[in-house]
Amino acid sequence: MTGSERRSGTALPVPGGLLDRDALAARCREMRARGQRIVFTNGCFDLLHPGHVLYLAEARAMGDALVVGLNADVSVRLLKGAPRPYLRERERAWMLLSLRSVDLVSVFSEETPLELIKAVLPDILVKGGDYRPEEVVGREVVEAHGGSVQIVSFLPGYSSSAMIQRIREGTLPGTPQLP
């Protein structure tokens, strides 16, 4: 694809690591058979920022492969309200799969990622610091499978909500300290 084609509005290609639930389950079975530890997390990832990048890198470091369950556009709208999502699910998946830390992405449209977690059966289920382990959807499934739930701290000063507010206000406060 040439630069002019990209600028002309040509759709992003479907990323190779974007799998439907059945294909993802099969791939995870293959990885598990090879002895790989699978890490799973989920989210909207509507406006990708340094907090997301660090969170995903920390999650990936816990195992051999990181699987991200990505909320479908309709799910994001229900959770966050209009006008979100700002980026469509295919664009968000493409960005996530462009990160070194993310191996596979699967879009889910249910209210929670529980069915996707049942399909993946991750060794480690990771969520951000706004959760307590007992609140994490899928915890029982993962623990019954012999896995664990890990909570990763937030990078202070970064959140999609804060970014959206700064954009609306036209402000750009000092950049929080990156690790």
Image (spheres, rainbow, N blue to C red):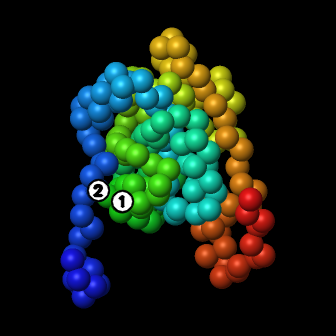
Q: Is residue 162 left or right of residue 107?
A: right
Which amino acid does the dot numbered 1 rest on?
Answer: Trp
Q: Give the SS element for disc 2.
A: loop
Contact flag, marks 2 and 1 (Cβ < 8 Å): yes
Query: Which label was assigned to residue 145?
Result: none
Which residue is at a point 76% across and 67% down the rendered structure image? 176
User: What x and y, as percent, mark residue 16?
Assistant: 27, 52
Which of the pair 66/111 is nearer the observer?
66
Most distant residue in the bottom direction = 4
Q: Quadrant of residue 20?
A: top left
Query: Which label was assigned to residue 15?
Result: 2
Mark 1 highlights which residue? 94
User: Mark 1 packing: few (<14 Cα in 10 Å), some, or many (20+)?
Assistant: some
Residue 52 visible in the displayed image: yes
Which residue is at a point 70% across and 80% down the rendered structure image? 171
Q: Quadrant of residue 27?
A: top left
The quarter of the image holding the C terminus is: bottom right
User: What x and y, as percent, mark residue 33?
Assistant: 34, 21
Which residue is at a point 50% across and 50% down the rendered structure image? 101
Which residue is at a point 39% across and 55% down the rendered structure image? 97
